[in-house]
Amino acid sequence: MGMGRFLQTAVSAVLFALLMLVPDATANQERQKPGKKEKPVRKDVMNFDGGVFFETDGSLSEITCFRVSGRVTAPHFFDGLKRIDDEHGTHYQRGREVVTEFPEELTISLVMFDFPCPGQLEKPGPRRYLTKEMMRTLRFSFYWKRNLELRHIENLKQGTARAEPIEPYNTEIKEDLAKRYRWFLEFTIPSADAPLTDRVVLMIRTADGRTAARVAARL
């Protein structure tokens, strides 16, 4: 082998050795690039101990308005009941038990009391409070709501119906003030085979059929 050929081979060997020692920048970047973090799975849990609560405002006229608060209960049914919303959808559990339907009956308790109309909150004006005569004319109806479909609930039973006087703050002019009451009403509705995804809708109507209030209780 000639000297020139020998030198060329030696230089090539040295260059190859040096290239083997140089780190691969691309490989290092790939190794150092942090892996994609998995998106955390959203999981919402709602506890129904004590029942299902709801509330809305209603009106009989521009000067007579009220607020109605309600609660849906059933013996032991809501104890430990939870709604879980996760990547699989919505489901209900009591401990490890999966629950899909309401019990045979539900009790709906309502409390109604006078509340300022929207215009009266902005500017004080005349007000007329709920009276026993007004309450007697109201019609209470219940429905099951599934998507946009409403199904009237038949065979409901009315239980408690009583009024408790609300004492005025200024007792010195008590005799000059209009009497105000807090109204307590209770209904029992059949609910066997109704899925928990259905909503209970309450409609309060006046004697002439006008809707005075509407509210839905949703699990």
Image: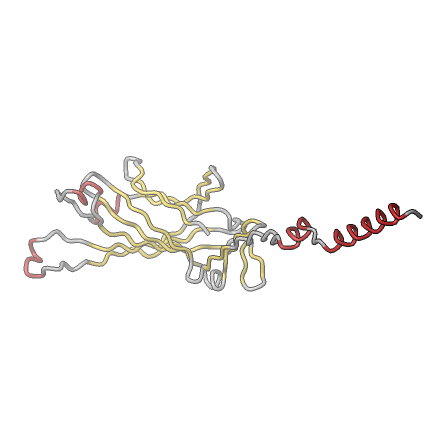
Q: Residue at x 49, y 42 (%)?
A: 146
Front residue of 140 and 73 = 73
Where residue 187 sits: x, y (%)? 38, 53
Give the answer, above or below, for where 162 lies relative to 145.
below
Where residue 139 sits: x, y (%)? 32, 43
Report the number of numbered marks.
0
Where residue 124 sits: x, y (%)? 13, 44
Front residue of 32 and 155 = 32
Q: Is residue 60 left or right of residue 218?
A: left
Q: Residue at x 35, y 53 (%)?
A: 70
Q: Residue at x 19, y 45 (%)?
A: 121
Q: Quadrant of residue 95?
A: bottom right
Q: Residue at x 87, y 46 (%)?
A: 4
Q: Is residue 64 left or right of residue 6?
A: left
Q: Which color scheme is applied?
A: secondary structure
Where residue 109 sits: x, y (%)? 36, 55
Q: Is residue 18 left or right of residue 139?
A: right
Of all residues shown, which one is farthest toward the right? 1
Give the answer, above or below, for where 79 lies relative to 11.
below
Front residue of 203 and 96 = 96
Q: Quadrant of residue 34?
A: bottom right
